Image: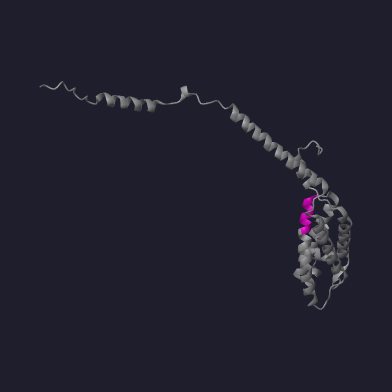
């Protein structure tokens, strides 16, 4: 079904399901490239990113919980969601990815601080992961909630259609009011009123009459 065959409200909902990346496509591709570098390059103590994300025995012995959490957030936000939004342009992948990379970037500061307290310092792979989530965070922040001209036009058509439906509904209500039959007085139930009237007549008939006075005698 084409967009022309949809009503304006359905068309707006369909367009809202897509994310217009505009000039952020290349930055997101670069973020994906840095994520791949994070997977392949050493993080600390010679361990690589894919060993951390797979929870290998060597990683469990060397890496902290913060580094495992960062690995999960970076994989979900950049490795999975960003790749999917680049392929499909689905807004749901972009919004979920935005959430993961934003939390991941904030968490990376804590991870670096914890790594600074240990003897083995961060290596190039870890910095590649941080750069990946930083680029993705900025890119998503610029496009996630922004509407493209097509979405704005669809929203305007939807508002116009809703206003037209409201006017049509009001016109139908006015027609129903005008066509409504007037009250038929022959069908009004006035039995109680008539019974009360008869009761009053009976009471009046039972009331004794005063005797008439004759002419006065001399």
Q: Is residue 193 positioned above or below 44 on the image?
A: above
Image quadrant for the C terminus?
A: top left
Mark yes or no: residue 63 visible: no
Q: Residue furthest front?
A: 218
Image quadrant assignment for residue 79: bottom right
Residue 50: percent from left, percent from top: 84, 63
Residue 201: percent from left, percent from top: 31, 24
The one of 129 and 120 positioned closer to us in this rendering: 129
Main SS of residues in magenta: helix
Q: Is residue 16 positioned above or below 138 on the image?
A: above
Mark yes or no: residue 86 visible: yes
Image quadrant assignment for residue 136: bottom right
Badge count: 0
The one of 6 and 146 positioned closer to us in this rendering: 146
Residue 76 located within the stretch drawn in magenta: no
Image quadrant for the N terminus?
A: top right
Q: Residue furthest left?
A: 218
Residue 90: percent from left, percent from top: 80, 49
**Colour scheme of the picture:** one colour
- Residue at horizontal 80 percent and vertical 76 percent from the top: 116
Q: Is residue 34 positioned above or below 215 on the image?
A: below
Which stretch is magenta?
90-98
Q: Is residue 169 positioned above or below 195 on the image?
A: below
Give the side of residue 82 with respect to residue 170, left or right.
Answer: right
Residue 96 located within the stretch drawn in magenta: yes
The one of 161 and 44 positioned closer to us in this rendering: 161
Residue 122: percent from left, percent from top: 84, 73
């Amino acid at each position: 079904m084409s967009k022309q065959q949809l009503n304006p409200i359905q068309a707006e909902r369909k367009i809202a399901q897509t994310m217009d990346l505009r000039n952020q496509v290349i930055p997101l591709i670069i973020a994906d490239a840095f994520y791949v570098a994070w997977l392949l390059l050493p993080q600390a103590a010679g361990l690589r990113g894919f060993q951390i994300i797979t929870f290998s025995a060597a990683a469990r012995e060397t890496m902290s919980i913060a580094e495992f959490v960062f690995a999960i957030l970076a994989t979900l936000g950049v490795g999975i969601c960003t790749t999917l939004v680049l392929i499909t342009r689905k807004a749901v992948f972009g919004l979920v990815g935005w959430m993961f990379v934003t939390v991941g970037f904030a968490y990376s500061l804590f991870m670096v601080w914890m790594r600074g307290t240990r003897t083995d310092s961060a290596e190039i792979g870890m910095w590649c992961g941080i750069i990946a989530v930083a680029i993705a965070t900025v890119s998503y922040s610029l496009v996630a909630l922004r509407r493209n001209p097509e979405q704005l036009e669809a929203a305007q058509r939807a508002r116009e259609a809703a206003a037209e439906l409201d006017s049509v509904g009001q016109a139908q209500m006015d027609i129903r009011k005008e066509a409504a039959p007037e009250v038929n007085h022959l069908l009004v139930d006035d039995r109680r009123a008539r019974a009360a009237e008869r009761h009053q007549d009976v009471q009046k008939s039972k009331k004794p009459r005063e005797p008439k006075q004759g002419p006065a005698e001399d």
